[in-house]
Image (cartoon, grey):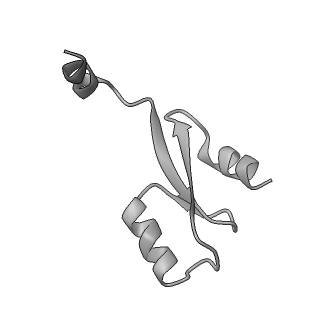
Amino acid sequence: MDRLNNLNAVPTTHSIYYWLDGYWITDKEEAELMDSINAFGSLHQVAELPLGADVEVEVRRLLS
């Protein structure tokens, strides 16, 4: 029964992928592509944020 409850659970967070220059996206595959061509001079980092979070503010906080 727990498995069924987990399948119906509504996500409360999402992943963002960001670089040291402050650029961020939400698509993991695109982040990996950007890393493969060294688009930003660093490898991406991952943060799990609440759905309602201001991503710009959170990325600045993570980079400070």
Q: Residue at x 62, y 65 (%)?
A: 19
Q: Residue furthest bottom?
A: 37
Residue at 45% over, 54% down: 26
Q: Residue at x 53, y 32 (%)?
A: 52
Specify whether 23 is left or right of 60. Answer: left
- Depth order, front residue of 2/41: 2
In this view, the residue farthest toward the front is 2
Q: Is residue 6 above or below residue 52?
A: above
Residue 62, position in %: x, y?
71, 50
Figure quadrant of residue 3:
top left
Left or right: 3 in relation to 43: left
Q: Of residues 44 and 30, which is closer to you in this image?
A: 44
Q: Is residue 17 left or right of residue 21?
A: left
x and y, in percent, of residue 36 in the image: 47, 80
Q: Find residue 28 and report its horizontal and vertical position in percent.
A: 41, 60
- Count numbered badges in the picture: 0
Across and down, in percent, residue 8 comes to 24, 23
Q: Quadrant of the N terminus?
A: top left
Asked if residue 13 is positioned above or below residue 4 in the image, the reply reads: below
12 sits left or right of 10 in the view: right
Up the image or down, 33 lies above or below 29; here it is below
Towards the viewer: 23 or 32: 32
Corner quadrant of residue 5: top left
Residue at 44% over, 70% down = 32
